[in-house]
Amino acid sequence: MRTHPKHDAIARLLREGLSNGEIGRRLHTDRHAVARIRRGLGLPNIVQRVQTLDEKWAANTRAADGGHVEWTGERGSSSGTPVMRYREQSYSPAAVAFRMRTGRDAQGYVKAECGVKHCVAPAHVQDEAERLAARAELHPGPLTGRCRYGHERAEHGRFEPDGTAYCARCKYLAKFPDKDDRALLPEVQPLKPARSWEEAFRRYAQPVDGGHLVWGGTRANGTPVVSWRGTTVTAARLALRLHTGREPEGRVTRACDVPLCVAGPCLQDRPMRERTNELFAAIFGVAA
């Protein structure tokens, strides 16, 4: 029998453990010829190990600064959202990363909460259940009662990233006006414009135990704010001005340990902090 012109090169690669197909690609020869030489040498066939879902995810990711993970694989043509195909099924790389971290399948949409778009670091992604739980921790107390259009907050209540509550049903209907059948409840009257800064503040300052006032209104980047007649100020600054009767100096900070408290007695501006430090130093010998 005539010897294959690339017999020696094929035999060498076979002994190195390469598959018939890989050798055929490297040497530009027929893989069936490689298989015949394999049989002639008495070498076993290479059983290709099937890549797991997690391994394919890892093969299409790249570590980035700050603990982030960049997706290097396929993306949606229009949105740029990472996608991954495995065994004729489509997977979300973010959902795979979530399962790798938690050991369970995600509930709802999975996305990065680290601020980096399309990051797929397992530690940076959250499903809907985790997002709701994390945002609920920022909100003072559970969602009870109904929104002004009668939707049960226990069913439709959701939280913004800063913990501000909103009605998901109302938000959905606002996007689809043709489906909007909302009407104010008979006992709910449209909110009239506030007549003063104090009235605008009192509407959303909720009294709780210990004399504290927890903010339940709008927040900007997590900071409670009050708007009146086109002007917006921080709720803490307004609260201290209402409490002391003067304009605060410098930054206003919270002196109590109650999150989102905007009670005037619990707030301090720069002069108040300086006096506190002086008193503390006089008593204990060091500043607070």
Image: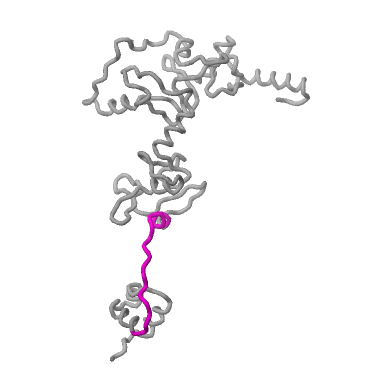
Quarter of image, res 186: top left
Query: How many numbered circles are shown?
Result: 0
Q: Is residue 280 left or right of residue 245?
A: right
| Quadrant of residue 231 within the rendered picture | top left
Estimate the x, y position of residue 265 in percent, counting from the top left. Answer: 60, 14
Report if residue 182 is visible in the image: yes
Horizontal arrangement in the rendering, residue 138 relative to residue 190 (left or right):
right
Asked if residue 115 is positioned above or below residue 144 in the image, the reply reads below
The picture places residue 104, in percent across and down from the top left corner, at 41, 45
> Is 26 contained in the magenta span?
no
Q: Position of residue 270 (x, y in %)?
A: 63, 21
The residue shown at (38%, 60%) is: 51
Viewer-side residue, 90 vs 160? 90
Q: Does any portion of residue 240 appear in the rendered image?
A: no
Please give the range of residues in magenta: 40-58
- 185 to 10, vertically: above or below: above
The N terminus, quarter of image: bottom left
Q: Which residue appears farthest toward the left when viewing the image?
A: 178
Q: Quadrant of residue 59?
A: bottom left
